Image: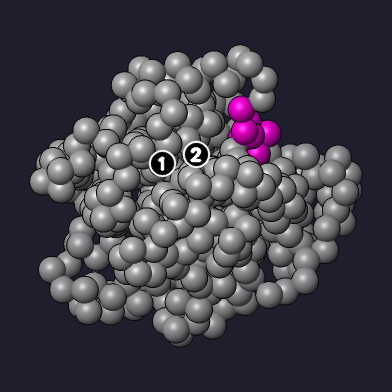
């Protein structure tokens, strides 16, 4: 992992010409969608602005109509539910938006998705002769069930396409060493930087004061959870790659009448999971409240006593960090991507054997002072290791280490818009 130079927050990060560094962030996902990519890009944008950069975003519109919202350009798109729930495919880039971006002339283009907007990002960077950085957020091997009946064939497809895509970049950022190892295994030979995604943890904290404690109690009551019962919180999309059937089976094996599992979220596997809970005989100890608004997420963490997950498809585990910042010990299936997050016996445990959940629940529920101590340690660890300012400064260090000279004049925006259309 490369050492990165850091710039003071609020300091002006400029070019040789004295103007702020211009950064174009491209992503297929943007607000109001809620996922790890959106969290990462919105956090990076805010931190780069705080560091004095001039930042714009190119993303997909939730409809065919392209439009601009301040410094966010949205290009028209079509739904692609057959590929992935809520996925969209971009239409040809709006010429007006493209001309504006080219006249603005970013110094660095930073792509965060591998599909529609990445094509545009690559062509803009080539046209202007500026560096193209790409953050590889997702291990697509964990999603082969969406597009291939064979995991081996799916993996080979992912390996080939990923290597070819990243060969067109100037630097690659991986959020974890696990992801970096995967990319090296694919034969990716671009400069590779491991930079954990930082989170804005100001909203994520344990319940503070009577009002928030009363709110957590009200949420429990609304779910029919009796006072005194312990609550395990799971917060994720209800989909196969999250391995939520395993969570239900672990809870059933633990067989604790004093514990309720709350599976917050929605997705294509919800009905199947509800049926599996009935089949396991634990339906009365499991709640499915459905999807929630992003602003409500901290409230739902706070009604829990511990966070549980069996997902092994995480590139970093941002929900684990959020839960930890809210004072929840972590109980999750072993995954190397979580090694920096889960400190055994201090912020939680990674589970290997079928009876591990039962054993650790007994440790937590029987020793409340220890659970509270782990909660405090988790809060401290979340804020010290995964802060948003550190994330922004390290990414900026990548830009500063590779930025191209700014002297050559760009080609006319009219030429690229007319002769070299940049499809989204």
Please indicate whether residue 251 sits to the left or right of residue 332 in the image.
left
Along the line of sight, the residue nearer the viewer: 76 or 246: 246
- Please tell me how crowded label 2 is: few (under 14), some (14-19), or many (20+) other residues with Cα within 10 Å: many
Residue occupying image coordinates x 65% and y 39%: 201
Sequence order check, earlier mark of 2 and 1: 1
The answer to whether 252 is drawn above or below residue 400 in the figure is: above
Q: Nearer the viewer, residue 177 or 69?
A: 177
Q: Position of residue 13 (x, y in %)?
A: 84, 49
- The residue that mark 2 highlights is 305
Q: Position of residue 163 (x, y in %)?
A: 42, 77
Q: Specify the principal SS of the magenta part.
A: loop
Q: Residue at x 66, y 47 (%)?
A: 373
Viewport quadrant of the N terminus: bottom right
Residues drawn in magenta: 199-207
- The reply to whether callout 2 and callout 1 are in contact (CB within 8 Å) is yes
In reply to whether residue 201 is colored magenta, the answer given is: yes
Above or below, 256 relative to 227: below
Q: Secondary structure at mark 1?
A: strand
Report x, y in % for residue 397.
76, 62
Q: Which residue is mark 1?
A: 232
- In the displayed structure image, the side of residue 190 where residue 218 appears, left or right: left
């Amino acid at each position: 992992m490369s050492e990165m130079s850091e710039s003071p927050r609020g300091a002006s990060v400029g070019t040789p010409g004295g103007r702020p560094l211009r950064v174009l962030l491209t992503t297929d996902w943007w607000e109001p969608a809620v996922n790890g990519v959106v969290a990462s890009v919105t956090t990076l944008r805010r931190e780069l602005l705080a560091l004095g950069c001039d930042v714009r975003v190119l993303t997909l519109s939730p409809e065919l109509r392209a439009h601009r919202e301040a410094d966010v350009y949205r290009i028209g798109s079509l739904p692609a539910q057959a590929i992935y729930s809520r996925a969209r495919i971009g239409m040809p880039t709006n010429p007006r938006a493209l001309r504006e971006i080219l006249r603005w002339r970013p110094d660095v283009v930073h792509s965060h998705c591998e599909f529609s907007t990445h094509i545009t990002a690559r062509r803009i960077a080539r046209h202007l002769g500026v560096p193209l950085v790409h953050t590889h957020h997702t291990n697509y091997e964990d999603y082969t069930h969406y597009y291939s009946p064979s995991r081996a064939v799916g993996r080979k497809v992912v390996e080939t396409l990923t290597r070819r895509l990243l060969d067109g970049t100037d630097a690659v950022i991986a959020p974890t060493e696990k992801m970096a190892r995967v990319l090296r295994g694919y034969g990716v030979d671009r400069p590779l930087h491991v930079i954990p995604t930082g989170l804005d943890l100001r909203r994520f904290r344990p319940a503070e004061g009577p009002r928030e404690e009363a709110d957590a109690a009200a949420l429990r009551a609304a779910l029919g959870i009796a006072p005194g019962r312990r609550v395990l919180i799971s917060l994720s999309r209800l989909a196969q790659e999250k391995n939520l059937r395993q969570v239900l089976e672990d809870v059933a094996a633990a067989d604790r009448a004093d514990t309720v599992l709350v599976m917050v979220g929605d997705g294509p596997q919800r009905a199947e999971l509800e049926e599996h809970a009935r089949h396991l005989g634990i339906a009365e100890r499991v709640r499915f409240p459905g999807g929630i608004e992003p602003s409500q997420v901290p409230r739902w963490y706070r009604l829990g006593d511990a966070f549980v997950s069996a997902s092994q498809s995480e590139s970093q585990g941002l929900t684990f960090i959020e839960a930890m910042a809210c004072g929840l010990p972590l109980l999750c299936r072993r995954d190397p991507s979580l090694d920096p997050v889960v400190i055994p016996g201090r912020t939680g445990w990674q589970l290997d054997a079928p009876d591990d959940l039962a054993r650790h629940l007994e440790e937590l529920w029987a020793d409340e002072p220890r659970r509270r101590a782990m909660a405090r340690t988790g809060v401290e660890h979340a804020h010290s290791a995964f802060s948003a300012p550190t994330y922004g400064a390290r990414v900026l260090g990548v830009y500063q280490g590779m930025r191209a000279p700014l002297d050559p004049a760009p080609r006319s925006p009219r030429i690229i818009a007319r002769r070299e259309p940049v499809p989204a």
